[in-house]
Image (tube, rainbow, N blue to C red):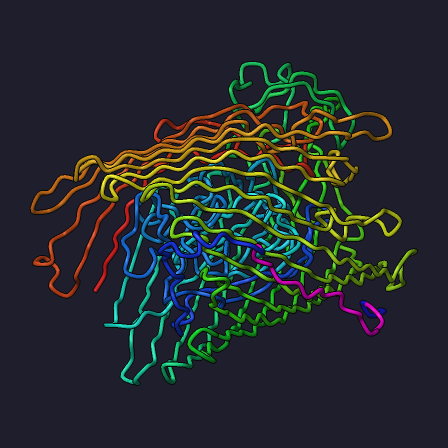
Amino acid sequence: MSSIRTTRPRSVLLASAALTSFVTIPAALAQQVREPLPRVEVSPAQSRKQAKPAGRDAQSARRVAPRRSATATAAPKPAVPGAAGPGQLQTPLNSNAVAESASRLGLTVREIPATVEVISAQTMREQGYRTVSEVAQGAVGVTSGDAPGEPAGFSMRGFTNSQINTLYNGIKIGPQNMTSRIMDTANLEAVEFLKGPASLMSGEGAAGGSINFVTKQPHTGAIRNEAEFSYDSLNSFRTHYGSGGSTNVQGLDYRFDISRSSLNGFVDDTYTKTLDVSGQLNYRISDNLKVWGAIEYREDRGKAYWGAPLVPVAFSGSHATSGIVSGNYVSNYNGTNLGAVTIDDRTFNTNYNVLDNRNVGQEVWLRGGFELKLAPDLTLKSQAYGYGAERNWFNNEIEAFNSGTNLVDRERFYVAHSQRLVGNITDLIWDTNIAGFDNRLVTTLSTSYLDFVRPGAANFPGDSVSLVNPDRGFYGLLTTQQQTARIDNEALSFEDRLKLTRTFALVGGLRVEHIGLDRNSTDKNGLEKVGFPYTKDWAPVTGRIGYTWEAVPGLTFFSQYATGADVSANNIFLLLPTQPLDLTTARTYETGVKHLFWDNRAEWSFSAYDIQRKNVYAAAGGMLLNIAGRQESKGVELAAAVRPIDPLRLWGNIAYVDARYADFNFVGGSFSGNTPPNVPRIVANAGASWRFFTPWPVEVGIAGRHVGDRYNTDANVVTMKAYTVADVYAFVDIPKAVFNAVDQARLTFRVRNIADKRYAIWGDPFYPDQILLGAPRTYELSAAFKW
């Protein structure tokens, strides 16, 4: 087999440009009393990250990817990611959190001229979010569905899949729809959502924004331990143990977590088992120098659910359901006309996958770095990282009803990933004064190098089975071929904040990067295919400019203009070498307000945005990719939370988006005016809880979610109908006198989907003949202890 690429020197196109801070400033302004930026202090490696591009793969020709890692970056003070800022309590919307994936300037959510949402570990526990997909479903305007081909797929502000960067401690490993895996939340400190084009922070691929998963970090102080256990009516269980604090060695702090889960699906013979072990050491050598190191091993193994087939209403008869899907459909796979379609109620729990199916992922992270104060106003941070992953899909993935035979046509697919990524991120933070105005400048140099080997199926065995009680059979003969990729990335970025007054600040940044891609593809005999090896280079320039104005204490207005860029195809292995592989560009205009008031008991935020993305590859249905001229998205988001009296807490959010394609014409038709798949116009969440302050404190709560109509493909012929679901819970805090060995003990009973609603949660555009259904009502009992 030939190698991925021929070794050759690369010219790196990196511009060195700094954000200039506004030439002339009236002297009167210069004399106003200003609030200086907090000094950057050497602090435990709390989670500073940046991302690099890489490649991952998608559905049936699917899966390939790179990943990144990160930690240190500019922070004004020690701040636990996802937690409130130094010395501050968590506010109702957690706007005191320092979201390090949204800015390297060490700013809180309220100080960033963009919409940023941080969901803390505390919120995850209270709302019962077990996986990152469930966390996303509670965020403002975000939807998610665990399609097996792209576990933890997300939709946000009209964009989906690889148009949203997924980061791990600030590091990107590749297109989300090729590298993501189902992840338990037990080892996470926070999940950060940055909305809109975000290439300044995480590089190529962030047209719709980015989602950052932050692992738990060491703290300085007494050792604290925690343990959690849960069990539900599907015989699923989760366990977690964590410990962290200061050791007997002066300046050495640690954190260690281990979690294990077995989540059973509501469909026959489906489950996911996860194992996550993570640890980090922070060592403060002196007041000016700190070093740190972290390691994580993550594993998931399961048998997958690929959806329920669309079936003609005429065939299902009395078993046809309403309120799940609607529309008329011609099968993308076998070409038969199904007419008006439905989900047959006899297929709710049916597994059409082969008996020997498997989905496996194993990942290892190694990260380490230092933080050095060179001078009172100058700090250097650097981290090196390595990431390795092995992934494997071995399934029957297509389930297409054939109206000619009244059987379900099936087709197998196999693909594996062997991914290796190494990189470095170095930040230089400079606090200075420009014409009497406080200024902070962060200069970041990042590099990453990714090797990706992707053995995949060269043949696709198929058969047909009955709709009800299918003979699942086995995979059959497997013949493989191989694809490889090397992705190199180098980037230089600048981010700056200039405080013109105590209440008004200009915030902006610029990123220049070089992306180099080398691909190769061989057939089942190991011979190179026509058009390979294939080489391509890009040099995108992206940035952000905006302001924040605290008109009155707690009330902040903001606006921004930001740009993004990404490789136009979400799967670098799906495109032929003859198809143009150009950069897609995105830009956004956004304005809004963030308000914290009533002695920190109430908070709300509002934003309005207009995003445009050009030169878009989109799935026409199945394995076909078309080029759409533009993708446009306009919308508003509103979130609020309040505690009017101590026992009562209320919260809610709503998002409206109008997303559509423009100039999307191709041979044989046009999708101009259509809505991208899995994008609802309206998403709303709301919740309430009441706490009884009794000797054994009890809290009861409810959380509801509404998701509007969505389409499963760009053709917009089948609608996944709107749905509303609700969860209820009650927990009791057991007094310390009962368990003297623990400081806190809590028992929780939770009912998910209390009305037992049947609904479509996600549609895979590459497999348009089937729909993924949401889970029915389940009951869960859990216990948590801290000591």
Residue at screen point 37% across, 63% down = 79
Give the percent coordinates (x, y) of residue 307: 58, 36
The answer to which image quadrant residue 743 occupies is: bottom left
Name the chief secondary structure element in magenta.
Answer: loop
Magenta part of the protein: which range? 5-22
Quarter of the image for the N terminus: give it. bottom right
Does residue 12 appear anywhere in the picture?
yes
In the image, taking residue 169 as reference, residue 200 lies left or right, namely right
Q: Residue 702: percent from the left, percent from the top?
A: 29, 33
- 493 or 182: nearer the eye? 493
Above or below, comparing residue 277 to residue 588 in the picture = below
Residue 268 vertical position relative to residue 391 in the rendered view, above or below? above
Q: Quadrant of residue 764?
A: top right
Q: Is residue 140 above or below residue 242?
A: above
Give the x, y percent position of residue 491: 66, 64
Q: Is residue 26 left or right of residue 623?
A: left
Q: Residue at x 12, y 60 (%)?
A: 739
Asked if the stretch drawn in magenta spans residue 107, the answer is no
Q: Residue at x 48, y 60 (%)?
A: 105
Q: Is residue 195 left or right of residue 139?
A: right
For residue 599, which quarter of the picture? top left
Quadrant of the frame with the C terminus: bottom left
Q: Residue furthest front?
A: 27
Q: Is residue 595 above or below residue 655?
A: below
Q: Position of residue 203 (x, y in %)?
A: 63, 56
Q: At x 11% / y 58%, what residue is drawn? A: 736
Of residues 751 and 543, the one drawn nearer to the viewer in this rendering: 543
